[in-house]
Image: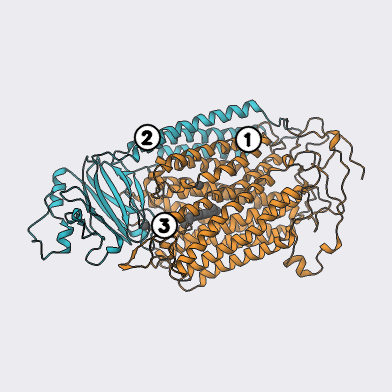
Chain colours: A cyan, B orange
Amino acid sequence: MAIALVLVLVVVGSVLFHALSPWWWTPIASNWDYIDHTLVITFWITGVVFAAVVLFMAYCVWRFRHKEGSKAHYEPESKRLETWLTVVTGIGVAAMLAPGLYVWSQFITVPDDATDVEVIAQQWQWSYRLPGADGKLGTSDSRLISAENPLGVNPEDPNGQDDVVVEAADLHLPIGKPVKMLLRSIDVLHDFYVPEFRAKMDMIPGSVTYFWFTPTRTGSFEVLCAELCGTGHGFMRGVVAVDTEQDYQAWLQEQSTFAQLTAPEKVGAAEMVQP
Amino acid sequence: MVDITPRAADAIAPAEVPDVELYHPHSWWTTYVFSQDAKVIAIQYAGTAMAIGMVALVLSWLMRLQLGFPGTFDFITPEAYYQFVTMHGMIMVIYLLTALFLGGFGNYLIPLMVGARDMVFPYVNMLSYWIYLLAVLVLVASFFAPGGPTGAGWTLYPPQAILSGTPGGQQAGILLMLASLILFIIGFTMGGLNYVVTVLQGRTRGMTLMRMPLTVWGIFTATVMALLAFPALFVACVMMLFDRLLGTSFFMPALVEMGEQLSYGGGSPILFQHLFWFFGHPEVYIVALPAFGIVSDLISTHARKNIFGYRMMVWAIVGIGALSFIVWAHHMYVSGMHPWFGFFFATTTLIIAIPTAIKVYNWVLTLWRGDIHLTIPMLFALAFIVTFVNGGLTGLFLGNVVVDVPLSDTMFVVAHFHMVMGVAPIMVVFGAIYHWYPKITGRMFSEWMGQFHFWVTFVGAYAIFFPMHYVGLVGVPRRYPELGETAFIPDSVHTLNAFITVAALIVGFAQLVFLFNMLWSLRYGRDAGGNPWRATSLEWQTPTTPPPHGNWGKQVPLVYRWAYDYSVPGAPQDFIAQNDPWPGKAAPA
Ligand code: HEM
Ligand SMILES: [Cu+2]
Ligand SMILES: [Cu+2]
């Protein structure tokens, strides 16, 4: 009999735990509140199903437990009940899938006005590259990587000369502007993950992956690597600062371009990047 | 209607299958060690699987100690943590659960339940075990190899798996892991072909496919799936070995490691992930389907009621088995594969929830108006339903592509898969061991030790893994040996982690009670008789208990009905064995 009670307690305990839990997702800092909404819908549907199934079990165990002389009912199957349950389940599943797929199509459709920002991962640090005044990133190739050109930017490509290179330092982004994060790795798999942005994506050596989002809240957010990349995986951290437009421009002024970094003697230090 | 009442035509004359003398072993070695008896092989498989499973359990304590009390244990360096994670995951999934369900329960139960004398290829069956043992030994050897075992994660994703930034990547660790997996697959294939052919060809007369117990259906379908899925892992392992040893570039693009250009180029790391998960997702069901089958039989027997909707249950098993081959990329939503795949795989994944839900309904509907005996196997079956429903429902979060984006690679995923493919199948393993222990040994286990083991394991496992979902919701990534000072992680998460660790240690130690019970009862348990649960399926009807080599004595049983004739109105008892001709007469001998 204890089991019927414990089954009820499992449901009550789980619901209370959920309701009282101080452990909840971080306050969102991007446009992906749709994802949070879909999550909440899913919590409701699954929570109700869980409680219903387990409470029904508890009732059965209590009501139909063996007593002297009791005998089970004999009923091999019931077409009507089985069909009915299948249909209801189908509807519940569709109610979760439909909003999910709708939001996914938004998630993978990058708006035209999104700015490219390249993230480059390597064991075990983050670097970034922003397009310069021309708004275009130069091509890159991991074969070109060397001590002077740690990100493998193509020196022959005119588009790349004015690219802003942020090596192993914090990234800054302006608030309210959609960004397309182009993700590149030069050694193994990594994953660019900022919990407050909700989005994440693996980075694969040899390809460029992406996701997009719009920062909606200023502040400083921690970057974690979310794909096992060797011994330093748990320590591969970084910072993304979301700034007001003004602060962002101030930060950008202090950064160096690819051309400046590769040929510092030719370009005068005074000739800073003009956004 | 279900095929339940025997018709006149079913009274076939029994076939005498002569018990060939040559067939029996003649020495101690061939009886107990190099045995070709499926039941001995089953026990060898199960014993080896549980022994290596203990290693995985101890590794989980070490990981939990590190996560609960970071910085306290100097010997758990990040390298060591990754080695523990990898070996724990791989052992649990492959060397414990797959081996135990198919090699252990499959070998013991298939021949007995379908009324065969043995597997159809006993010699190959024996080889299967010895190759499995070799695979386990190679795996264990990697703990002692220079550099230790691989720390690449159980998914072994290249490029890191074979590079120097990962423990064992440039040493023996990864080589031994790949070699061990290759051996495991060879050994499994030998056993697997046996199980399939025995079910298709070795059934006794009257045992139609739609009269087989669901245990056999579950193991059979899982074996067919494994035979189709393991080759993908096999080739992936061979290709990775080539990349590592011969310098090919199947999975290796041009890359720069620690500032040094490597000579690889042109390969695709994503290709490995597709191969891995083409195996890896069916693998989840290779573990789950036998559990589904077994738990159906436990519930039916101990609730004294036929399993509700038997035919639907069979089709659900087969349907889940087939569908599970087209959902693999739900493990890769954030892998960087083409985003359009997300639509397809999210849809297939959520569709698979429907046959799975049907199974759950039918289990609980079997309880409805039953005559529920709260035996230890029944308690574990109930615990299975709770944990499986819980883990299955969180699967709907992770399968629904966009919801997976924030949750993937966090502790939410770890909590989900432990609930659904760790805890739930393990509950069935325990339930099944308690259920068949009297048949295997002829003795009853200790009831109070069983009760103790059940309560601590069920409540404890729920206390470990339910709260862990919330650690993941906060955003804590998986495979992090410590969280350090991370702004978004409040202190309360550390407290919760410590709580989970304590629960894990308690649950772990409760397993010692289980092992003690099994050994103690072997000698001191009371005599169980041939059919203590008054069950219908054939294994309970053997002339002697434990069943001898050849199982049936002179005559194999003749089957008149399905395996679920419990509480049939008008019958003299509340169960009718499958080989009982009631209400007709037994065919003349
Ligand atoms: C009391 C029992 C168990 C405990 C306390 C436990 C604990 C853990 C922990 C702490 C991790 C590492 C989490 C991380 O840092 O990412 C882990 C990973 C894992 N566990 Fe368990 N576990 C248990 C049982 C099982 C069982 C029965 C299975 C069988 C399916 C299993 C399969 C796995 C897998 C596949 C991984 C992932 C390994 C990887 O990330 O490469 N565990 N477990
Ligand atoms: Cu990483
Ligand atoms: Cu899967």
Q: Which residue is mark 3?
A: B268
Where disc 3 sits, the SS reads loop
| B275 left or right, relative to B472 | right
Residue at image point 48% right, 46% down: B416
Q: CA distance from mark 1 to mark 2?
A: 32 Å
Residue lying at the far right in this picture: please name it: B588
Image-quadrant location for residue A259: bottom left
Q: Which residue is mark 1?
A: B362
Where disc 1 sits, the SS reads helix
Q: Nearer the viewer, residue B329 or B460?
A: B329
- For the residue marked with disc 1, what is the amino acid? Asn
Q: Which mark is residue B467?
A: none
Q: CA distance from mark 1 to mark 3?
A: 44 Å
To which chain does the residue with label 1 belong? B
- Queried on whether the Cβ of the residue with tag 3 lies below 8 angstroms from ligand 2, the answer reads no
- For the residue marked with disc 3, what is the amino acid? Ser
Q: Are marks 3 and 2 on the same chain?
A: no
Label 3 packing within 10 angstroms: few (<14), some (14-19), many (20+): many
| Quadrant occupied by the N terminus of chain B | top right
Would residue B531 be seen by someone viewing this image from the given angle? no
Q: Nearer the viewer, residue B503 or A179?
A: A179
To which chain does the residue with label 3 belong? B
| Quadrant occupied by the C terminus of chain B | top right
- Disc 1 vs disc 2: Cβ atoms closer than 8 Å? no
Q: Please state the horizontal and vertical placement of residue B131, each as a whole percent of the image.
A: 64, 65
For the residues carrying marks 1 and 3, which lies nearer the camera in this image? 3
Q: Is residue B359 above or below residue A274?
A: above
Would residue A20 be seen by someone viewing this image from the given angle? yes
| A204 left or right, relative to B245 | left
Label 1 packing within 10 angstroms: few (<14), some (14-19), many (20+): many
